[in-house]
Image (spheres, rainbow, N blue to C red):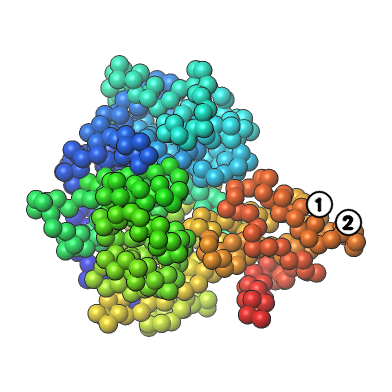
Amino acid sequence: MPFYAAPNHPKLPFDPPDSITVGDFMLDENYGRHPLGYSRPMFTCGMTGKEYSALEVRERVDYLARGLAKELGWSPNSGSEWDKTIGVFSVNTLDTVPLAWATHRLGGIQTPANAAYSAAELAYQLKNSGAKCLFTCLPLLATAKEASKEAGIPDDRIYLLDVPEALSGGLKKPNGMKTVDDFISQGAKLDRLEPLNLGPGGGATRTAFLCYSSGTSGLPKGVMISHRNVIANTLQITVHEQAARKTRQQPATQSDYTETALGLLPMSHIYSLVVICHASVYRGDQVVVLPKFEFAQTLEAVQKYKIATLFLVPPIIILMTKNKPLLDKYDLSSVWAIFTGAAPLGEETATELVKLFPNWSVRQGYGLTETCTVVCATLPEDIWFGSSGPILPGVECKIVTTEGKEVTGYDQPGELLVKSPSVVLGYLNNDKANAETFQNGYMHTGDEAVIRKSPNGIEHIFIVDRIKELIKVKGHQVAPAELEAHLLTHPAVNDCAVIQVPDEKSGEVPKAFVVKSPSVGIEENNRVVARSIQKHVEEHKARYKWITGGIEFIDEIPKSPSGKILRRFLRDKEKETRRK
Ligand code: 4UV
């Protein structure tokens, strides 16, 4: 029995079913979705006010699936899901999630890519995932085309999602390029699709989403997230949150526990994809979709749509604490909960925020792409800043020391291992990473954690450090191995290592240690060489991966006898330098 396995949780209302796709689960009344949510808007555009109710979404999903089946020559039971992978490279739109659900109806997979990606980064994901077509939006069309060409996706397999005109900067839809709405109007005239047969393993073994994560080391890898994984975490979050909602609200009717949520975080990232676009939606919430972060516009949307729950990442919370006068210009009285995750929220920042807004409940969640999101999250009745809260129902955790010994007491650090019905199927085509990461039913998170007991007797998980090779910039993943491989293609770089350094705005940013090539003349100015290396990154990588933590030239990269970079040594050296 693990040390931290069974807090006194209510059980899930039912076993996560494996007989249904996640899309159908979300739209089917029989699965306990909040009934009031059918008549309310499900997705509302925070910029234009355009919106779709759940009933409209259900119809759009159905017609979209029919239209896509005709366009692509697919049917629900033809081929395997891997023959029906659809890439999405877009800012948040009202149709991003319905498109996934339509893809599921066709027995296919959605692989969402970060909208900040460069063409080369997108091409890597499209090739690696075997995407057969790509949905993008006008502002990203040029990058999408370049990447598709490299990935072998023809131009007539690039389609458009609809974004507010204000974002398109006067760009016009190219003649003949098809949009989601085209497929929906076409699909409305077509016959119903045959029912999907999920096969012997059902939704428990079929991939629904292929998100990208570098895991504990190496390059970004396709994470195979099953239908059942998403359904399971949706139910786990719902039960975990249930009591909090009931105690907070004064419902108009006894069953009115739905609310309005902020859909600002990118839907390509697991946090938004599961926590907002599935768990919130399942509870009948209205999600106000914003395509990109613009501070005043976000506050305006909160005021206009009376948003109650703000899903954020620490850098935005820091910005809020530093801009009280701007916040005071808006009526934010509808807000009751701020959810934060994807990177640690400092205790001081949380304290500062509730000092400024005493009515807000600041709640932290912790999770990973590989656990199909939430492992633990704080509850309003036992807020403890710095904590990531108690585990969700159905989750079991172990903490294991570097010597492989299981921790059996409070405040003893070790790597956090997670068992949950939401732990994913594994990485696509990567036996080595799978063997390292998924062992005996536990996912090895690469995060260092301790368990502490609150004065109320509730056990909380605190994430105290990151053991794995991962940098979190504004909550986005940056893989040191990816940057190192790229840096080595610069003629001045003979060897290199990338680590994270703290940054006030972004939480962390990458810093590179570089051994210069012998070809670099002694007379060459270090600043000029460093700038040229930085430029090389800026030209090929998404902005959040830029080496803004600086470049330091050293004589040798410290390595173990087997050639592994001793990052801990570099991180300690960096800490020492910063202390001075
Ligand atoms: O794979 P990923 O990019 O996934 C995420 C997921 C974020 C979530 C999950 C559940 C929530 O309720 C929520 O609010 C946000 O970011 O990166 C996973 C790694 O991010 C770090 C940690 O190193 C993970 O292995 N991380 C995620 N959440 C936290 C965190 C946190 N609360 N505190 C510290 N590190």
User: Is residue 150 in view?
Assistant: yes
Work out whether residue 449 or residue 140 is closer to the camera in this orientation and state it: 140
What amino acid type should be assigned to the residue bearing mark 1?
A: Pro
- Which residue type does callout 2 highlight? Ser
Residue 559: image quadrant is bottom right
Q: Determine which residue is flagged by label 2.
A: 519
Which tag, 1 or 2, sits closer to the chain's start?
1
Whole-Å distance between the Cαs marked 1 and 2? 8 Å
Q: Residue at x 57, y 40 (%)?
A: 122
In the image, is 87 to the left or to the right of 569?
Answer: left
Q: Answer above or below: position of 42 versus 315.
A: above
* Quarter the N terminus occupies: bottom left
Q: Is mark 2 within 8 Å of ligand 1?
A: no
Left or right of residue 441: residue 12: left
For image coordinates 35% across by 48% down, the residue present is 300
The answer to whether residue 580 is above or below residue 529 is below
Q: Are marks 1 and 2 in contact (CB under 8 Å)?
A: yes
- Which part of the image, by quadrant, shows the C terminus? bottom right
Can residue 431 be seen from the camera position used here?
no
Residue 129 appears at what percent x and percent y? 52, 40
* Location of residue 457 in the rendering, given as x and y in whole percent from the top left corner: 25, 80
Residue placed under numbered mark 1 in the picture? 491
